[in-house]
Amino acid sequence: MIDKIVHGNSIELIKELANNSVHAIISDIPYGIGYDDWDVLHNNTNSAYGGASNAQLEAGSLFKRRGKPLNGWSEADKKIPAEYQEWCESWASDWLRVLKPGGSCFIFAGRRFAHRCIVALENSGFTFKDMLSWEKNTAPHRAQRLSAVFERRNDTNNAESWQNWRVANLRPLFEPILWFQKPYKTGGTIADNVLQHGVGAWNEAALRDYLIGDYYDKSSNIIRVAITSDDHGKHTAQKPLALMELLVSLVTKEGQVVLDPFAGSGTTCVAAQRLNRHFIGMEIDARNCEIAKQRLSDSYQTKICL
Ligand SMILES: C[S@@+](CC[C@H](N)C(=O)[O-])C[C@H]1O[C@@H](n2cnc3c(N)ncnc32)[C@H](O)[C@@H]1O
């Protein structure tokens, strides 16, 4: 599987990887919030779920499908967070098994259910090491004005009384990146683990090379990177290449192996390839696999032409 994008269900495919065979796992996993079809990890449907209202259709590509309200539509909806945790537990022990002792695992897990992912990985044996904050310049956002609802009801008193109040969330300008570590030998030192397995420390040059903005030092766990026009259009949840390069170079050295079991359009793998790491990408959607393979081929050609 090395240096390939493998088409299939990673929860099954990962069983083919040997114990302690990868140096880092870096993955933007489904957040379980119904963002797209691949992000629906529960069976509670409803005639309105996933459909679109006229207003949503008019809004174009953003907010084009109806999600569940945070409050849920039924009692079954209250179980969605716990079901997300169970889903994370269905693969976490294999992630632990294939990672080298002391190896890092970075997960993009979404703000609402990140805690479920943390508990699932902790229950499976990982150490939860830290949480990075990836700051974005923009984020799609819709928080309806409460007064607009009352105006539609011709309730002018309440429309006035609730001026400036909104429902839904604040603009989501940061995303958490969860940082886990596979425990190393009890009683041993991390320095000895680094010598034995090549992982366990982090490289401050990665932060100096990729962080932008005015952070007073370059060892901050708040991350902002440059975004280019290539960082859009290949996947609905595409992550910036510079961000993935930062994470790859933060915890691996040249020649080491990076695994992404939810590869999407392959951004993690492209980052690994550009930085002379080996990679294994797994992706369930055949179209995404083709896009990822094309990106890898283009980036390889660019590299050998330099
Ligand atoms: C958040 S997206 C990753 C996007 C990626 N960061 C990028 O830059 O393109 C998650 C991906 O996981 C894939 N996926 C979902 N369940 C999967 C599974 N069981 N096995 C492999 N891939 C899966 C989805 O098809 C989706 O492309």
Image (tube, grey):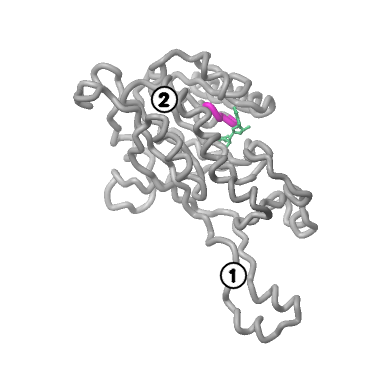
Q: Residue drawn 60% across and 79% down?
A: 162
Q: In the picture shown, does residue 136 fall above or below 87?
A: below
Residue placed under numbered mark 2 in the picture: 96
Report whether 84 appears left or right of 72.
left
Please say whether residue 110 is visible from this viewpoint: yes
Q: Kindly indicate the quadrant of the structure image that contains residue 39.
A: top right
Q: Kindly indicate the quadrant of the structure image that contains residue 12.
A: top right
Image location (x, y in percent) of residue 267: 53, 32
For ligand 1, give the image quadrant: top right
Of residue 13 and residue 172, the one placed in the foreground of this image is 13
Q: Secondary structure at mark 2?
A: helix
Residue placed under numbered mark 1 in the picture: 166
Of residue 278 and residue 16, the one placed in the foreground of this image is 16
Image location (x, y in percent) of residue 224: 42, 47
Q: In the picture shown, does residue 82 fall above or below 157?
A: above
In the image, which residues are magenta?
261-265
> Which mark is first along the chain, 2 or 1?
2
Is the residue marked 1 within 8 Å of ligand 1, measured from its CB? no
Dominant secondary structure (helix, strand or loop) of the stretch shown in magenta: loop
Q: Secondary structure at mark 1?
A: loop
**Residue 297 is inside the magenta segment:** no
Q: What is the spatial separation of the Cα atoms under label 1 and label 2, in whole angstroms?
A: 43 Å
Q: Residue drawn 56% across and 24% down?
A: 11
Kind of residue at badge 1: Arg
Q: Kindly indicate the quadrant of the structure image that contains residue 59.
A: bottom right
Q: In the picture shown, does residue 258 fall above or below 158?
A: above
Q: Nearer the viewer, mark 1 or mark 2?
A: 2
Dot 2, how many residues are within 10 Å of its Cα: few (below 14), some (14-19), or many (20+)? many
